[in-house]
Image (spheres, helix red, strand yellow):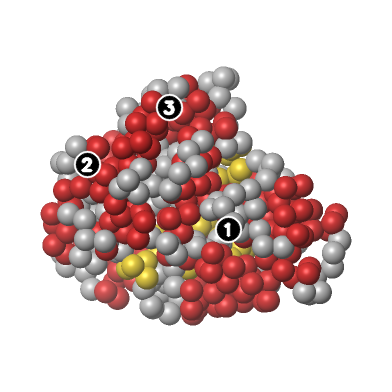
């Protein structure tokens, strides 16, 4: 019987094995989008137990535990850490077919050298062994990053962030990995949220200015873009539940902003118009800085009202939306392009029915000298499993240019999630190997190795860090 997660895991043909071991396995990681805490990286504290490292903030695990019927007390509640780990261990054997099952065991094997399957029977043994090893320096955040050969980390940061820990990490010559902020302006765009007034006060504080008008607001955002750029930012990131673009004038956007300051109700049309105007303005700012704009489209968030009121937002009750995005996306990109301010842009879709839409969309806009200026981003969230990754790459290859793809990202809050890059690389090697052995691609070692190197690391490095002469 074939061992579970052996060295040939997911490599089902000889060409795939050769490509993986000769080229893909040793590539460094350019993790351009994640949700790691720069403060945790800076402080570099050891974790007292595996639950703190493994289960805190991991929505993937939380969702599967809920679907398995685990009480919330053992997920986000006040249960002891051992009790939470035991509940997770009881859940895992039921997850065969889910990528979390693979990731769980890859993380145990890669970082803890534990080659056992997690279950109620092995829970105590694995708990004790992990907790003992977590006291070793090699399992502190920085060492885990170094062991995974990570050269770049793009965190996700609110515009009001002081970026204190990014600055400290940049000045620390003992830590070689670049930890760059990413500008995430959701609070500026979703002004209907109850949190907006308090967030606006924070924006006033960090910019040292009063915001009494829309012009003041735009100037404050520009000031924060400048500040992020000075501190190493190379990208923005937008949550786009529905991609609708209906441009309005600055005066109209200002009137909507003024209504919000006065706590007057806003219509859906007004919100769409305001967001359309601001997305364009922000895109213009990004282009000036030569940043990458990332658009994460199609998530239905906080579906469970009871749990949102009980625990809060963004705690694992999100799902795939079904809204159309083709026309709105085209109009936004075209408006920026017509005004010569279209930045490099990565398009991520949560609904896989839009794969071909995005694979076709990226070919509509280009710039001489920038291969793949508009990117169809990696299979995201509910799609980052084997079938989803293969589908995303096949759809990109069928309609676009797979060789210019910027590859995988963790999109995670966990220091153990770098195994997802290895997971992706094995899947990519296997896909290329299948094509070669079926006669659909040439058995050209140099050509395939170059392609793997680029998709696995170099395309992303060039895309996010190279700047043209202004």
- Which comes before the other along the chain, label 2 or label 1? 1
Q: Is residue 144 left or right of residue 448?
A: left
Residue 89: give x, y in percent of width and height.
Answer: 32, 48
Query: Could you give the CA–CA distance between mark 2 and mark 1, rounded to whole angstroms?
Result: 34 Å
The residue beneath circle 3 is 133
- Which comes before the other along the chain, label 3 or label 2? 2
Instruction: Give the secondary structure at mark 3.
Output: helix
Q: Is residue 46 left or right of residue 290?
A: left
Question: Quick check: 348 above or below 163?
Answer: below
The residue beneath circle 1 is 1
Query: Could you give the CA–CA distance between mark 1 and mark 3, rounded to whole angstroms?
Result: 30 Å
Q: Is residue 253 visible?
A: no
Q: Are there few (<14), some (14-19), or many (20+) residues within 10 Å of tag 1? A: few
Residue depicted at x 33% and y 67% = 319
Do labels 2 and 1 touch, CB within 8 Å? no
Q: Is residue 18 visible?
A: yes
Question: How many tags in the picture?
Answer: 3
Q: Which mark is residue 83?
A: 2
Residue depicted at x 32% and y 27% = 48
Residue depicted at x 17% and y 45% = 77
Question: Quick check: 68 above or below 159?
Answer: below
Instruction: Give the secondary structure at mark 1.
Output: loop
């Amino acid at each position: 019987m074939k061992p579970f997660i052996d060295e040939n895991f997911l490599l089902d043909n000889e060409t795939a094995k050769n490509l993986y071991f000769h080229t893909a396995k040793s590539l460094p990681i350019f993790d351009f989008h994640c949700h790691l805490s720069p403060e945790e990286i800076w402080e570099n504290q050891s974790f007292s137990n595996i639950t703190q490292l493994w289960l805190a903030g991991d929505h993937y695990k939380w969702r599967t535990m809920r679907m398995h019927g685990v009480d919330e007390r053992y997920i986000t509640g006040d249960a002891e850490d051992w009790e939470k780990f035991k509940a997770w261990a009881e859940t895992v054997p039921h997850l065969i077919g889910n990528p979390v099952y693979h990731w769980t065991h890859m993380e145990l094997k890669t970082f803890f050298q534990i080659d056992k399957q997690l279950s109620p029977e092995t829970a105590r043994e694995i708990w004790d062994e992990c907790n003992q090893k977590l006291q070793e320096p090699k399992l502190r955040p920085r060492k885990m990053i170094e062991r995974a050969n990570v050269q770049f980390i793009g965190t996700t940061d609110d515009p009001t962030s002081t970026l204190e820990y990014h600055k400290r990490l940049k000045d620390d010559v003992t830590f070689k990995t670049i930890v760059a902020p990413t500008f995430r302006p959701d609070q500026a765009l979703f002004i209907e949220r109850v949190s907006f007034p308090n967030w606006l006060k924070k924006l006033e504080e960090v910019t040292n200015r009063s915001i009494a008008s829309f012009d003041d607001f735009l100037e404050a955002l520009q000031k924060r873009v400048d500040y992020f750029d000075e501190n190493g930012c190379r990208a923005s990131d937008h949550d786009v539940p529905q991609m609708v673009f209906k441009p309005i004038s600055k005066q109209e956007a200002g009137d909507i902003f003024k209504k919000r300051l006065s706590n007057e109700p806003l219509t859906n049309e007004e919100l769409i118009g305001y967001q359309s105007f601001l997305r364009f303005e922000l895109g213009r700012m990004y282009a000036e800085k030569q940043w990458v704009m990332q658009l994460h489209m199609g998530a239905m968030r906080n579906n469970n009202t009871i749990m949102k009121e009980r625990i809060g937002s963004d705690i694992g009750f999100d799902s795939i939306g079904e809204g159309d995005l083709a026309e709105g996306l085209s109009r936004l990109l075209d408006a920026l392009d017509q005004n010569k301010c279209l930045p490099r842009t990565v398009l991520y879709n949560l609904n896989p029915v839009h794969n071909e839409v995005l694979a076709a969309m990226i070919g509509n806009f280009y710039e001489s000298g920038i291969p793949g200026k508009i990117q169809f981003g990696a299979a995201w969230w509910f799609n980052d499993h084997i079938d989803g990754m293969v589908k995303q790459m096949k759809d990109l290859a069928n309609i676009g240019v797979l060789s210019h793809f910027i590859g995988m990202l963790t999109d995670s809050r966990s220091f153990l999630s770098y195994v997802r890059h290895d997971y992706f690389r094995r899947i990519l090697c296997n896909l290329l190997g299948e094509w070669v052995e079926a006669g659909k691609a040439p058995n050209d070692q140099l050509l395939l190795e170059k392609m793997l190197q680029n998709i696995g690391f170099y395309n992303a490095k060039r895309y996010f860090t190279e700047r043209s002469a202004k």
